Image (cartoon, rainbow, N blue to C red):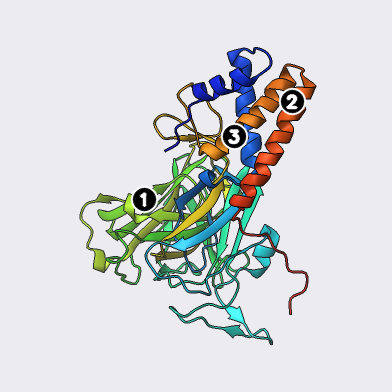
Amino acid sequence: MPSFTRDEVRTKISKRASGSFTDADFDILLNDAVMEVVTDVKLRSMIRKADLSPNLFDDVYEHTCPSDLNGIDIIDLKPQNQKRSRFDYWELVTSEEFDRYKMSSSSDSSGDPINIVAGSSYLGRNLIAIQDADFARTLLISKPVNDDELSIDPLNAVGDWVLFGDGTNLTKDSSNYVKGSASINWDINADGGTTAGIQNTALTQFDISNYVSSGSAFVWAYLSDATDVTNFILRIGNSASNYYYVTVTADNAGNSFQDGWNLLRFALSDKTETGTVTDDECDYAVIYMTKDSGKTSETDFRFDNLVLKIGKFWDLYYYSNYGWQTSAGVWAEESSGDTDLLNVTGSELRLILYKGLELVEDHLQNASQSKIYSEKYQLEKMKYQRSYPGRVLTSTSTYYNI
């Protein structure tokens, strides 16, 4: 637990500064100093471990990116409950290269697929990337694993699927789909209700006993217009009187719904039961959106590939850009109270002090003293980096693929 409060740092800096400053000015300067140091130096105290969310799956590439990830400073991914092979290395690549090389299988020199047997060591490319778009960050991961998949329905034919709520005009769509050969296309009518989607009361019977505690249901949802969509709800069970239901308000990576294809993940650990479900005799499913009543007369919504998966539990190690903790232990990018704690050790505190004094002296228009502390900071930085070199994955790109 860090032991240096903002008030203590203020005292240390004020005793060394060549002039006085207001508390309000100091709070701004110290936050700036901490952010500059955290960005400039890979501080070992800033290494964090987070559960990978969702679990690692064979063909699910998008994951929630920690909000405090410092740039692309990823250190490692480690399994929580299994031995890691010596071949389990990771490559950090651009999101463009990730999209080209992501795979759940490999190929030989002729381009023919090589199937990867569950449990075998994988000699291919285990890829990590960060995708930034529209002020949202997504963690991308590609690694073939045995994720215990159970297909409920590929959703590539209408079959016994019927409309739910304000859904209308149910058709097979062989031109726009994610998996298999088609998706199920449907429209929203003009009724002005608050739900719309599809349902099936006659699915081939399936057993969810192994999934109800830690499994997740996945389905692709295509939104021709994401406006006024509040959430998606999945029901799985035996009938309209006996089912589990799960509600999601974001996509699989934790980002807002967007126009186009969205991968939805329904964690069954969040389920609510209506009636009594017989887990090993399920043949009922409903997938629908909750919408604004004014969302009417829209076309070309789609669902594709409804499956259950368990996946593997992994931890993500990375450098944080949150230099502070509140007294309650909540990490924060900026300090807002005198009892907030710096996420640093004693040797790292010197970096903060020198950078803080550099900014304070510059604020006091004392250029010579500011330069002295800037030089002290650079020397301290070199000493620290010799003792504690950064551990981030090196970003790579493929210029020629042999």
Q: Residue at x 49, y 48 (%)?
A: 48
Give whichever of discs 3 and 1 has the lower sequence position. Answer: 1
Q: Earlier in the sequence, mark 2 or mark 1?
A: 1
Identify the residue at horizontal 66%, vertical 60% (top origin).
Answer: 394
Foreground: 329 or 355?
A: 355
Type of amino acid at the residue the image marks with label 3: Arg
> Mark 2 to mark 1: distance in Å?
57 Å
In the figure, residue 99 lies in which quadrant?
A: bottom right
Give the Cα separation between the discs numbered 3 and 2: 15 Å
Residue 370's label in the rendered image is: 2
Quadrant showing the N terminus: top left
Residue 303 visible in this rendered orientation of the protein:
no
Q: How far apart, in angstroms, are the residues tagged by discs 3 and 1?
A: 50 Å
x and y percent of residue 114 in the render? 57, 84
Disc 2 crowd rating (10 Å Cα; few below 14, some 14-19, many 20+) is many
Q: Is residue 98 left or right of residue 49?
A: right
Helix, strand or loop at label 2? It is helix
Q: Identify which residue is drawn at 59% across, 21% down.
A: 27
Q: Secondary structure at mark 1?
A: strand
Marks 2 and 1: which is nearer the front?
2
Look at mark 1 in the image and give the residue it sits on: 246
Vertical side of 2 occupied by 201: above or below:
below
Callout 3 secondary element: helix
Residue under numbered circle 3: 350
Rendered view: 147 above or below 77: below
* Image coordinates for residue 143, horizontal then vertical, percent: 53, 69
Query: Could you tell me the amino acid type at mark 1?
Result: Val
Residue 82 point in image, percent of width and height: 39, 68
